[in-house]
Image (cartoon, rainbow, N blue to C red):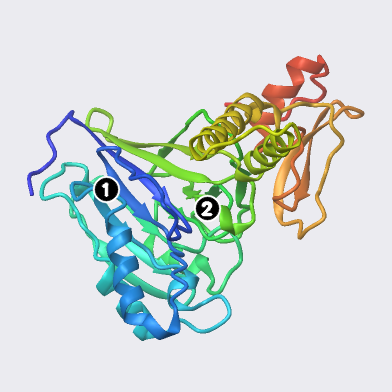
Amino acid sequence: MQRPRSGATCIIEITLVNSLTHLKLPAINTGANTSTLGNFNYEFRPWSLVNDLEFYSVHFRKLTGKEIQKVFISGDNDVGGEAEPVQSHLTTRFSHLFANSFPDSHKLFDRLSLSEVNLMNGEVTNILDSSFAPKLNLILSHVPFAFPSYHDSGNFITTLEPDLILSAHDHKAYIHHLPRSNGAAINSTEFTAVFKPKLFTVGGDEPILELQTPTCSYRMGVYDVGYGFARIEYSGENEKFTVSFSVLWLASRFYALILYATLLGVGLVVRVPFKTMQLRVLFLLCFTIAMVAKVIGANDRWAPNCTDPISHGGGNKYLLRYAYNSTAGECDTFYWDGQHRNGNNFKDLYECILTCYPVTGKWGKLPNVFP
């Protein structure tokens, strides 16, 4: 491998796929790399296990072109781990069927240290290593580090010292900022139906960034499904790594099916003689309308505001957040369950102050948080 040239800018773009089932999905071709973060849901038929295994492995490999480099991470439905122990013969089968691939030469890969952490059984697999400095320590994990799970993620953070973590599992998109030392609070933000990419600086003294990818399968029971997309960039001039993250959201099948059934029902009542091609066009039209509605309403679904009452949610309240207290005229902390959406909910004190204090005109007692 060649040493990265001083002052050069190197970029890797990664498509993140979670819960990819045997649906007829379009090929993902970004001219970049693909990382699958687990849960393929084969659903083998017992009487044809060998044939099904071969069929689904071949079918999955055909989803992306041969020129796309791929990294595969097993999920709990692939090797056990959710309702049963992780089984070694399943992990061996998975690694045999889904082999990782990397480019022969790429300057940014020279600065990547890449590891897979299986929080279901505690195994760590070293995928890539780098001797260059600075380098980016990247962890791939199906189970997120930010939430309590099978093993204490803090031990792996201490040992591996990651800068960036790519995870999945919970079928929802999150952005987590994890402290590099134990005991400090984890800052988490749900990334739902937001289309503008988020830009982060990673590495060095920056907090650990964890990007959690949502499911891309309609069968997981959530309304918002899509592919994660991350862009890693290294600048040789300032020797900094930056990461852009967004989600390529898919249309809501639930709304599209309801609209399709309604229009079809109206057509049958008025006795419209539908033909096969007309039904296909109608179905495509319904999905298009659902996608357009999603784009138009995306930023209004959880728009930041300073007037909503503080909502902790009904679940386990473990995330430290900030909200504007109109009575006191200042931003206060509260604990949130990570699920219930509310505009008066900010990831840090800076965001709360900069959003609410100028709008309300009540600057209150300004905390000493600005440099």
Question: Residues under labels 2 and 1: Cα distance?
Answer: 30 Å
How many circles with numbers are drawn on the protein? Answer: 2
Q: Earlier in the sequence, mark 2 or mark 1?
A: 1
Residue drawn at (39%, 59%) of the image:
140
Along the line of sight, the residue nearer the viewer: 152 or 77: 77
In the figure, is residue 295 to the left or right of 3? right
Q: Is residue 247 visible?
A: yes
Residue at disc 1, secondary structure = loop
Amino acid of disc 2: Thr
Residue 158 x %, y %: 44, 64
Residue 316 x %, y %: 76, 60
Residue drawn at (19%, 53%) of the image:
102
Along the line of sight, the residue nearer the viewer: 272 or 239: 272
Residue drawn at (46%, 62%) of the image:
142
Q: Which quadrant of the figure has residue 341?
A: top right
Residue 238 x %, y %: 28, 30
Residue mark closest to the camera, 2 vs 1: 2
Residue at disc 2, secondary structure = loop
Along the line of sight, the residue nearer the viewer: 26 or 195: 26
Question: Which mark, residue 99?
Answer: none
Name above or below for residue 163 compared with residue 291: below
Name above or below for residue 201 compared with residue 80: above
Instruction: Identify the residue at the far right of this view.
Output: 327
Amino acid of disc 1: Lys
Question: Which mark, residue 135?
Answer: 1
Instruction: Identify the residue at the far left of this view.
Output: 2
Residue 232 x %, y %: 33, 39
- Which residue matches tag 2? 215
Along the line of sight, the residue nearer the viewer: 272 or 99: 272
In the figure, is residue 137 to the left or right of 283? left
